[in-house]
Amino acid sequence: MSDQKLPEHNTAAEGERTLTTRQGHPVRNNQQQRTVGTRGPATLENYQFLEKISHFDRERIPERVVHARGAGAHGYFEAYGKVGDEPISKYTRAKLFQEAGKRTPVFVRFSTVIHSSHSPETMRDPRGFAVKFYTEDGNWDLVGNNLKVFFIRDAIKFPDVIHSLKPDPVTNRQDGGRIFDFMSNTPEAMHMLTLLFSPWGIPANYRQMQGSGVNTYKWVNDQGEAVLVKYHWEPVQGIRNLTQRDAEQIQAKNINHATQDLYEAIERGDYPQWELLVQIMSDDDHPELDFDPLDDTKIWPKEQFPWLPVGRMTLDRNPENYFAEVEQAAFGTGVLVDGLDFSDDKMLVGRTFSYSDTQRYRVGTNYLQLPINAPKKHVATNQRDGQMAYRVDVAPGQNPHVNYEPNSTNGLREAPRDVVEYTPWVEGHLQRAPIERTNDFQQAGEQYRAFEDWERDDLISNLVENISAATPEVQARMVELFTKCDEDYGRRVAEGLEQVRRGREEREREAVAQAEERSKEAQPY
Ligand code: HEM
């Protein structure tokens, strides 16, 4: 019958482009299932159909619990070989930084945080900026955001802040009332909110935004000495942000504008670049500062802790497959190389557990065997098996029977202990306690005053619009907190909320009057 014939262009002799099943069987008819007669019923032994449909049924993996919407690209990082004017080896022995001009391949994933994987890229939200460096010493992930601070300073509060920002579990809508209920009880969020509700909360695209490690890390040198360090990415393309109105206009026509912008720029050879800069502090408590250097709701003032350039990143290759490379990419703050270390930042430690934990669930036990996540160097472990294991990490010449260490029968051995370990001294009571120097309002106020007029206007209007969904008690608490940051800030939010309240009352009065009018006009029947 004619409808069972293969289309003309599909009738070439069997060869490399022949469609097959995953078992390698050639597929001779991809148009019809096997049925009894022309009208069915279908048969259950139809392996080709069952394989196709059941694989389709499993096409999605759980999306990231946060940062679900993303775009990625490959590129390289080129070191300057120094930090500012000093030799970088004074502070870190990490090999990727040492020689000027040394290139390390990278993969970067940019993202929005709160909404799901096909949500509009114009949403007000921090942007993720996660970089995987495939170094000669194994992978280093620098998992950052565009904004330089965060809402909270202790990882135990992360599920709560995210729940407040995610859609309501009943209505499935994001709700300013819920967000500001949480935030009005979280004074440390004021700095982040001041940035997020300004135009800095909607970067124009991924190429024209900054990046920041946000949390404090350490660098360790050859002598095993450490300094505290913060990372910043500065876009060579410049920085551009959107007002709420600009964003709405884009969103009306395009919900993928940032992904599209990144992809198209790379396709036309206009490769985006960022300079990597660091701030350095000696590794101690710094009692002279009015904030705690390990508090991620604070920036380290540039005047006191200058930004020192260490290298430049270029993105020059789009992924060949979105799912394999971008969706399955797995970044984590625990992924450091020799010469880089953790600080005691209470967010960082929580993050470091959370990333690999979620990835074992989201991608699978063997997620590090996937090409996008595997280091580009030799891997030799005694880890075996688990779901979807498709290679064994044996070294050349290794006895494959020996998957334990220590051993005396040609198995794997520890690397030589030829580096000076960094061994920080830690003491104190085990307790649940807030940090001492909270100083929740000063930097938020400074940021408010540093904005240009149009940024401040947009900030006030966005806050008023969202906070007006909250109860009067929450509104009053928010005004009080903004006033503590800056009197003008609190006053303008209060005035905006008052205006909204009056407008609402006015509309309610009009609605009542109109209803009364209509009931008078109604005719008996
Ligand atoms: C993604 C946890 C704070 C940046 C994620 C994911 C989790 C998570 C579970 C999903 C990872 C995946 O499925 O692969 C946490 C926790 C935090 C925290 C527990 C606080 C304690 C932060 C902060 C930043 C940040 C402060 C910014 C510096 C990112 C980025 C991603 C991400 C960029 C997306 C990575 C990607 O593109 O795959 N986070 N996060 N997170 N987080 Fe965090």
Image (tube, grey):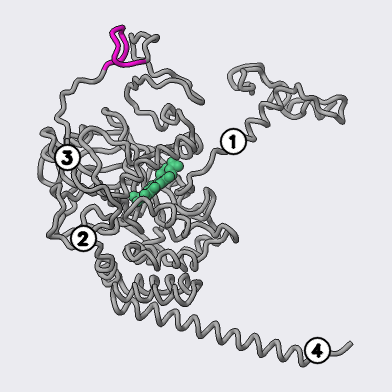
Circle on res. 258: none
Give the x, y percent position of residue 416.
19, 20
Q: Are marks 3 and 4 in contact (CB under 8 Å)?
A: no
Q: Nearer the viewer, mark 3 or mark 1?
A: 3
Residue assigned mark 1:
59
Q: Which residues are magenta?
A: 404-413
Q: Earlier in the sequence, mark 3 or mark 2?
A: 2
Quadrant (top left/top right/bottom left/bottom right) for the C terminus: bottom right
Res. 522 mark: 4
Mark 3, residue position: 424
- Amino acid found under the numbered disc labelled 2: Phe
Residue at the extreme top of the image, as rendered: 409
**Tag 3, which secondary structure?**
loop
Instruction: Measure the C-alpha gap from mark 4 to mark 1.
Output: 58 Å
Q: Earlier in the sequence, mark 3 or mark 1?
A: 1
- Amino acid identity at mark 3: Pro
Q: Is residue 58 visible?
A: yes
The residue singled out by tag 2 in the image is: 291
Q: CB under 8 Å between callouts 4 and 1?
A: no
- How packed mark 1 is, by other alpha carbons closer than 10 Å (few <14, some 14-19, many 20 or more), is few
The answer to whether any part of residue 268 appears in the image is no
Q: Is residue 409 magenta?
A: yes
Mark 4 Cα within 10 Å, few/some/many (few <14, many 20+)?
few
Q: Main SS of the magenta segment?
A: loop
Q: Indicate the position of residue 191 as horizontal and vertical percent values.
A: 31, 64
Instruction: Tell me: is circle 1 under 8 Å from ligand 1.
Output: no
Badge 3 density bin: few <14, some 14–19, many ≥20, Cα 10 Å: few
